[in-house]
Amino acid sequence: MTTTQNAIPHSAPPSTPHPESANIPAPRPSVNNDLAGFLADGSQTAPKTFVFDHLNFETASAQLTANSQATMTSLSETLKAHPTAQVQLSGHTDNTGTPDANQKLSLARANAVKQMLVSSGIAADRITTSGYGQDRPTASNDTEEGRARNRRLELTLTQK
């Protein structure tokens, strides 16, 4: 059983032309497509926050599911194409479980994504992480849909 971060089904991503002439696969709409567009737009400035889609973890775990690999690959390629970009990864959970366990889980998930990016060649000093647990919900925890929306990882572009 997996914990989904939103109700959007994962499908094979179409290729999105990248501003640096790379052809980075990113589902449309997606955080990676939006991030690449924002980075390419010289008129917009950081900070800007994006909520990951197509990024899921095993239940009560920081282990990414296999279907999250395309999102991670696309994110890595986007960050490689923009070597001055710096990001903060922020983990969030629903209110299932204890506040302490949720805070630790949210940080572990942010750190797992950071580690995957570092393993793909992104410099560790370009990425900071934080875990907020259940403290910053975006929806009611009274329904499964609301809890699913609260289980999320956000990327804040802190520098272009």
Image (cartoon, rainbow, N blue to C red):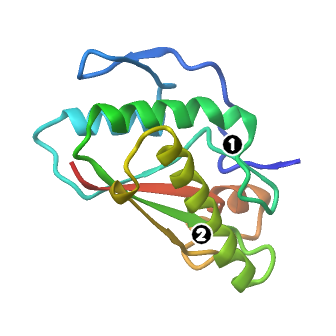
Sequence-earlier tag: 2 or 1? 1
| 34 sits to left or right of 54 | left
Instruction: Note whether 30 is above or below 45 in the view shown.
Output: above
Q: Quadrant of residue 139?
A: bottom right
Q: Residue at x 26, y 37 (%)?
A: 82
Q: Is residue 11 or residue 141 the one in the foreground?
A: 11
**Does residue 150 appear to the left or right of 73 in the view shown?**
right
The answer to whether residue 82 shows anywhere in this view is yes
Query: In the figure, residue 96 lies in which quadrant?
Result: bottom right
Q: Which mark is residue 44?
A: none
Tell me the amino acid under the disc marked 1: Ala
Q: Secondary structure at mark 2?
A: helix
Give me the residue at 26% from left, 47% from top. 85
Task: Name the residue at 60% across, 66% down.
Answer: 92
In the image shown, does 77 or 132 lie closer to the viewer? 77
Q: Is residue 118 above or below residue 147?
A: above
Residue tagged 2: 107
Pointer 2 local density, CA inside 10 Å: few below 14, some 14–19, many at least 20: many
Residue 140: in sight, yes or no?
no
Q: Which residue is mark 1?
A: 7
Residue furthest toward the right?
1
